[in-house]
Image (tube, rainbow, N blue to C red):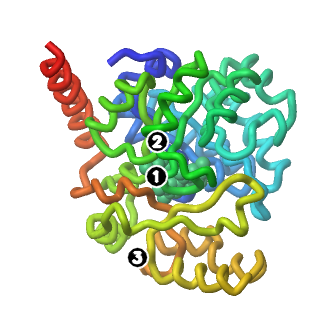
Amino acid sequence: MKTRITKLFGIQYPIQCGGMLWLATPELAAAISNTGAMGNLTSGNYNTGDGLREAIDRTRELTDKPFIVNITTMPSIRLPIELLREFFQICCEKKVTAIEVAGAPVDTFLGPDYIPMAKKADVKVLHKVGTVKHAIHAQKIGYDAITVAGFEEGGFPHKDNVSTIVLVPKVVEEVDIPVLVAGGMADGKSLAAALALGADGIMMATRFLATKESNVHPNIYAALLKANENDTSLNLQSLLSGFGLQVRALRNEMIRKIEEVEQKGGDLSDLLPLISGERARQVWKNGNVEEAMLTIGQSVGRIRDIPSVGELISRMVKEAGSAIQRSMRMIE
Ligand SMILES: Cc1cc2nc3c(=O)[nH]c(=O)nc-3n(C[C@H](O)[C@H](O)[C@H](O)COP(=O)(O)O)c2cc1C
């Protein structure tokens, strides 16, 4: 397959894994990159610059293919802004193929020197956006590409609640840089739809979570297979609306507790113990599905198996081809 994204990254298939805290590790990133798609190494997994350096080196031991490093630019107690700046510098020093920024734009959050720093190092920079306005800003300040994420996505969708199918064509009409589609993407039909909407590829995270190489506890795989498209919910609007965001996560006991606290007008100090990343980190491994906020998108309703990433990507590429041919036959 050839799109502006495959050319920009030097990859075979226009399919990227999104940032996944604790899960997008060197092992998963390399497994995905080795299929010809683009693996993701999430910098938030590490507490120090050296931790990220070692992880980049480890990923390079496991693959000689391109991968992207996610830097989530949101205020965080564990990951202060100085560390996020260091992460960005390390990606430039190490000349990773690309950086995926999610959250505040680099120019306002890290500073005006960071996009030029990446350009000088020939490191591509993408921004994940949930509005047309943010897409236009990203292009204006020099990002190489954008990921457009509708509110179906797992993680932190924009508070505007606009769906992928509406947002993507609007953004494609407004910007000239390559566009990846995220939020609800799960298979080859999604890829075909993204290309039909005028985009250059897709980004997925929930679907990659449901692969053998994500290496989560068997209970998590079982919960993913059981969940339907209406088993996630949007929460934490009170806490995150200042950043224009909210959280989409699996509806479980922890989400019900979070809702109770929110309804009683609880503040950050009441919510922090419930939403801490540390809880999720443990649950991915111990499988106590009810005990943490687990960021998962609506696409979970379309997941019916746990393939290897290799099986997933080859199936998606075939299926996208069939979907496009089927549509073309209808037009002739
Ligand atoms: C388990 C999990 C963890 C995530 N962690 C992060 C993260 O650390 N940083 C980030 O920018 N996005 C994170 N996301 C959001 C994804 O990168 C991506 O935007 C979203 O999941 C795409 O939509 P999908 O869920 O329909 O595939 C996470 C998503 C999942 C499923």
In the rendered image, residue 11, in percent from the top left (x then y), is placed at 42, 23
As drawn, 54 above or below 306? above
Residue placed at 48% from the left, 74% from the top? Answer: 283
Above or below, 174 relative to 295: above
Q: Residue at x 31, y 59 (%)?
A: 301
The residue wearing badge 1 is 152
Would the CB of label 2 be found within 8 Å of ligand 1?
no
* Label 3 crowd bin: few (<14), some (14–19), many (20+), radius 10 Å: some
Can see residue 25? no
Quarter assignment of residue 136: top right
Under tag 3, what secondary structure?
A: loop
Q: Which residue is mark 2?
A: 164
Which amino acid type is marked by label 3? Gly
**Residue marked by disc 3:** 287
Q: Nearer the viewer, residue 149 or 22?
A: 149
Q: Kindly indicate the quadrant of the structure image that contains residue 176.
A: top right
Name the front one of labels 2 and 3. 2
Task: Check disc 1: other Cα within 10 Å, few if <14, some if 14-19, many if 20+.
Answer: many
Q: Position of residue 331 (x, y in %)?
A: 18, 17
Side of 236 relative to 1 (left or right): right
Amino acid tagged 2: Thr
* C-alpha separation, residue under disc 2 versus residue under disc 3: 31 Å
| Residue type of the residue flagged with mark 1 | Glu
> Mark 2: few, some, or many residues within 10 Å (few <14, many ≥20)?
many
Task: Calculate the distance from the C-alpha at mark 3 to the C-alpha at mark 1.
Answer: 24 Å
* Residue labelled 1 has its Cβ within 8 Å of some atom of ligand 1: yes
The secondary structure type at the circle numbered 2 is helix
First of labels 2, 3 by sequence position: 2
Q: Give the vertical position of 14 relative to 44 (above or below).
A: above
Q: Which is more N-terminal, label 2 or label 1?
A: 1
Query: Decide: marks 1, 2 in contact (CB < 8 A)?
Result: yes
**x, y percentage for residue 60?**
52, 35
